[in-house]
Amino acid sequence: MAAPRNRLHHRRLFLLCLFLGRLWETGASQIRYSIPEETETGYIVGNISKDLGLELRELAERGVRIVSRGRTQLFALNPRSGSLVTVGRIDREDLCAQSARCLVNFKVLVEDRVQLHGIEIEVTDINDNNPKFQVENLEVKINEIALPGTRYPLPEAVDPDVGLNSLQSYQLSPNNHFSLDVQTGDDGAVSPELVLERALDREEEAAHYLVLIATDGGEPRRSSTVHIRVTVLDTNDNAPVFAQPIYRVKVPENVPPGTRLLTVSASDPDEGTNGEVAYKFWKISEKQSPLFQLNENTGEISTAKSLDYEECAFYDMEIQAEDVGALLGRTKVLISVEDVNDNRPEVTITSLFSPVLENTLPGTVIAFLNVHDRDSGKNGQVVCYTRDNLPFQLEKSIDNYYRLVTWKYLDREKISMYNITVAASDLGTPPLSTEIHIALQVADINDNPPIFPHASYSAYIPENNPRGASIFSVTAHDHDSGSNAQVTYSLTKGSIMAVPLSSYVSISSDTGVLYALHSFDYEQIQDLQLLVTARDNGDPQLSSNVSLSLFILDQNDNAPEILYPMLPTDGSTGVELAPRSAEPGYLVTKVVAVDRDSGQNAWLSYRLLKASEPGLFTVGLHTGEVRTARALLDRDALKQSLVMTVHDHGQPPLSATVTLTVAVADSIPDVLADLGSIRTLTNSEDSDLTLYLVVAVAVVSCIFLAFVIVLLSLRLWRWHKSRLLQASSGRLAGLPASGFVGMEGVQAFLQTYSHEVSLTSDSPRSHMIFPQPNYADMLISQDSCEKNDSLLTSIDFHECRDEAAAVQFKPLL
């Protein structure tokens, strides 16, 4: 059990050391990581969220992203884990070749903080490459007369790895004639050489087979081999000699592949096969080797691929000539590539000051540009200029730098963004040109006040609106942008009926929506006059005003109010008197009602809902006049009850009802005789009170009858005095109609002073009203009231219970 635990402990320590060795920081803005090459896609390089001091959710909120240029994206941010991961397989040798350290640098931008953090990732080497020879089999020809100690160069192995993982040593298979000597050059290059230790004898052994092994120092070690066949030759005492020690040639860069550049030539004075020469590249760089090809028989050098002056303008190589006797001759070949105009100018924006304020003075620098052409001579001379008629121009600075400046004032409200085209053309033949486009944002200043679309507004609001309801909206537009275009709304202070307007209406400062703080009543307020101010958020602030008229629309919220007959406040019931001799159409009374609403909501209609004797009375639809529909009969009840309704024409219609009691009688005594059918007794005390009132009415009636009798007696005495004797039946109906006031006169008199008796059971006072039935107006005039004041008589009766009962006589309105 102890052994697995130790292994687990050692594994944890190894992982911890590996993590600590992967990440370190040199400062707040520079983060460094280290990863081995050849890691799989998605390999976690480090926790970038933790190293930046951010939470996982903040990576997206703060706009954290990788900023790199000129290189294939090798790393990416994982927003779920906050880790920096690899995008694909990373090969250190492809990335950094033979550099001692392989560093990948890029930036991480935190947008909302406007911070750039430098990321440096060192890609460490692993031993993933074998030392590699250019050939797998090599034949070395050595003359049998070669002396011991003679050295023969062997091909070098190349290992793309670095450090201990690179090539470390060579080994030669054991043999009796050769040894291996490794030479180290000034540049650190290791070159193996085959050293002849003992003289050769072709007749004894014509060929020797050796194996050269190249080994690196990685873990695990890697190696490669080349099989060497040493052929022992007969004596050949003349080496090939080139006609020139150095060959020079100039070639334009646009020559097609396969073009012959030059031919090298070497001669060997030997005869026969010893004089035959074979050519091959001896010293040529790895990058140059694919560009050229050499005919080993003729010595002709031609292009294998296209040349590029901008990549390399000069090539230096060595050509070796070897005869069959392995005698060698070497020469140098220098190839100069001449430039042609095959590259367009490159325009780079060094600095761009965007956005630029619209009130920027003419001559202000907007951008710095660098112009470069990879060609040389006139092909690399560039002229830079702008196109279109824009308020910008280019000025030459130093070297290949230009300044883009304004030459007149800008106006953001007319043009908020410019797409500036900068063209660059070289002086080659034919000339080549290129264009770039600069997007320039024009920043706003507060030079425009908010503007309302209309000079004034009108709004119509139904009354009884709910509190807090939106009633209108105004919008002002500001041609500026940003905070300069942020409009806030307010109401100018004012008052209505000594109450501040702010207690009636409020406005949203952000949206311009007006809200009602109260429920409006058309009967109190018909309109409001407001002044709305729109103010921007610029510096200094600009504002504008607009007038707003709010008109309150009437709603049918008031039921009709009945003015007549007015029910007494003590709860008594009014009685209208209709004589039995009334003809059809006789005006009994008139219901008067008003409605506080206006317009159609105040148009009133009168209807008879219920009658104790249907068909006896009619009601005027628009006048409210109660008239008899037919002649009254003896069988008609004394008490007629009418229920009338008054309704308006609003939506929905509202109504009020009133109950009328009509007494059908020719005289007051008739009324008193049947008064019991009208009154309503609720208890014994109320019955006694009513009895007192009836007695009082009877006394008054008796006094009235006595007055009539006295009047008749006076008339009779005058008749006797005039000696106009007529027979008398002893009844009043027998009196002459010409000089005697009979029943018709009394009835007319009573009709003139027809009365309404109001009896209550719970009030100390009752009312008796004498109306004038011939008035047709809805309301009596003030003059009529003043005339009839003399007819008002009041009689009070006091009972032992300290409660008063009164009978009042007054004209009917």
Image (cartoon, rainbow, N blue to C red):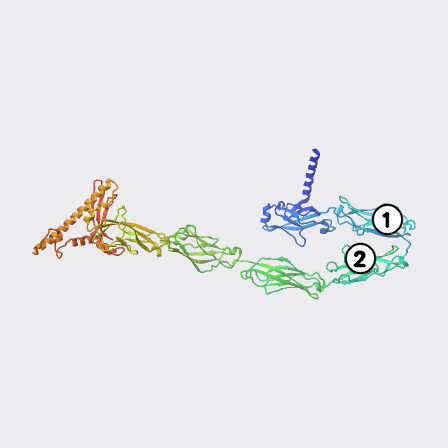
- Is residue 260 left or right of 751 when viewed as pictured? right
In the rendered image, residue 462, in percent from the top left (x then y), is placed at: 40, 54
Q: Amino acid at mark 2?
A: Met
Residue located farthest toward the top when viewing the structure as drawn: 1
Residue behind mark 1: 209
- Which quarter of the figure has residue 628? bottom left
Residue located farthest toward the bottom when viewing the structure as drawn: 429
Tell how many labels.
2
Q: Secondary structure at mark 2?
A: strand
In the rendered image, residue 784, in percent from the top left (x then y), is placed at: 23, 55
Say few, some or many: other residues with alpha carbon within 10 Å of mark 1 (under 14 / 14 to 19 / 20 or more): few
In the rendered image, residue 69, in percent from the top left (x then y), is placed at: 66, 54
- The answer to whether residue 398 is seen in the rendering is no
Q: Is 92 located above or below residue 271 in the figure?
A: above
For marks 1 and 2, give the CA distance: 31 Å
Comparing labels 1 and 2, the label whose residue is closer to the camera: 1
- The answer to whether residue 682 is seen in the rendering is yes
- Is residue 8 left or right of 765 when viewed as pictured? right
Q: Secondary structure at mark 1?
A: strand
In the rendered image, residue 401, in percent from the top left (x then y), is placed at: 66, 60
Residue located farthest toward the right when viewing the structure as drawn: 203
Residue behind mark 2: 317
Q: Amino acid at mark 1?
A: Tyr
Say few, some or many: other residues with alpha carbon within 10 Å of mark 2 (under 14 / 14 to 19 / 20 or more): some
Residues 753 and 152: in front is 753
Lower sequence index among marks 1 and 2: 1
In the picture, which quadrant includes the N terminus? top right
Q: Is 356 located above or below residue 44 in the figure?
A: below
Residues 190 and 761: in front is 761
Residues 632 and 194: in front is 632
Q: Which mark is residue 234?
A: none
